[in-house]
């Protein structure tokens, strides 16, 4: 039997979920543009994006549910999968940012390469 890491099948599930969400979201934007605009603006309130006068909905709203949106969400969600630990599998080599802004990995620190941290 072929044994794959938990991330392999989880990546497939994430791909299917995000793709379905983007297709449904894009369809709803076409069918119900005003309702989706209100929904997206409400989501923007959570991040305070609506409070920035330099950002109008016309500049960023239509980017929701685009191909670039799909790729960005996949990248973020897949990166989060890499940070999860599973019993019997190697621990994740989680990236961390130093106070100087450099990116290091926890495994490097454990191997004694912490002089740059």
Image (spheres, helix red, strand yellow):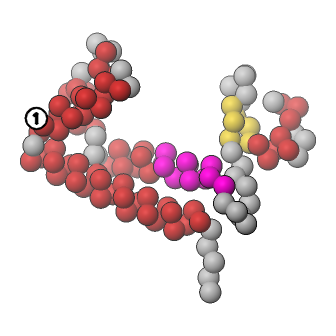
- Quadrant in which residue 95 is drawn: top right
Q: Is the residue 82 above or below the residue 6 in the image?
A: above
* Magenta stretch contains residue 82: yes
Q: On the rendered structure, is 3 left or right of 117? A: left
Main secondary structure of the magenta stretch:
helix
Q: Position of residue 59 (x, y in %)?
A: 25, 27
Write down the region rendered in magenta: 75-85
Which quarter of the figure is the N terminus placed in? bottom right
Query: Which element carries disc 1, helix, strand or loop?
Result: helix
Q: Residue furthest top?
A: 53
Q: Nearer the viewer, residue 74 or 67?
A: 74
Q: On the rendered structure, is 113 left or right of 47? A: right
Q: Residue furthest bottom?
A: 1
Q: Position of residue 86 (x, y in %)?
A: 66, 60
Badge 1 density bin: few <14, some 14–19, many ≥20, Cα 10 Å? few
Q: Residue at x 35, y 44 (%)?
A: 69
Q: Position of residue 34 (x, y in %)?
A: 10, 35
Q: Position of residue 113 (x, y in %)?
A: 87, 40
Q: Residue at x 51, y 63 (%)?
A: 10
Q: Residue at x 17, y 33 (%)?
A: 37
* Residue behind mark 1: 34
Q: Is the residue 52 above or below the residue 23 in the image?
A: above
Q: Is the residue 59 above or below the residue 85 in the image?
A: above
* Magenta stretch contains residue 30: no
Q: On the rendered structure, is 19 left or right of 28? A: right
Q: Residue at x 43, y 58 (%)?
A: 14
């Amino acid at each position: 039997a072929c044994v794959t890491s938990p991330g392999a099948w989880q990546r497939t599930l994430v791909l299917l979920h995000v793709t379905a969400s983007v297709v449904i979201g894009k369809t709803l934007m076409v069918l119900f543009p005003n309702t989706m605009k209100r929904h997206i603006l409400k989501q923007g309130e959570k991040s305070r994006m609506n409070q920035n006068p330099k950002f109008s909905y016309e500049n960023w709203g239509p980017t929701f549910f685009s191909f670039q949106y799909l790729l960005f969400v996949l990248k973020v969600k897949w990166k989060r999968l890499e940070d999860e630990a599973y019993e019997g599998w190697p621990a994740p080599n989680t990236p961390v940012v130093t106070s100087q802004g450099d990116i290091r990995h926890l495994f490097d620190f454990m191997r004694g390469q912490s002089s740059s941290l």
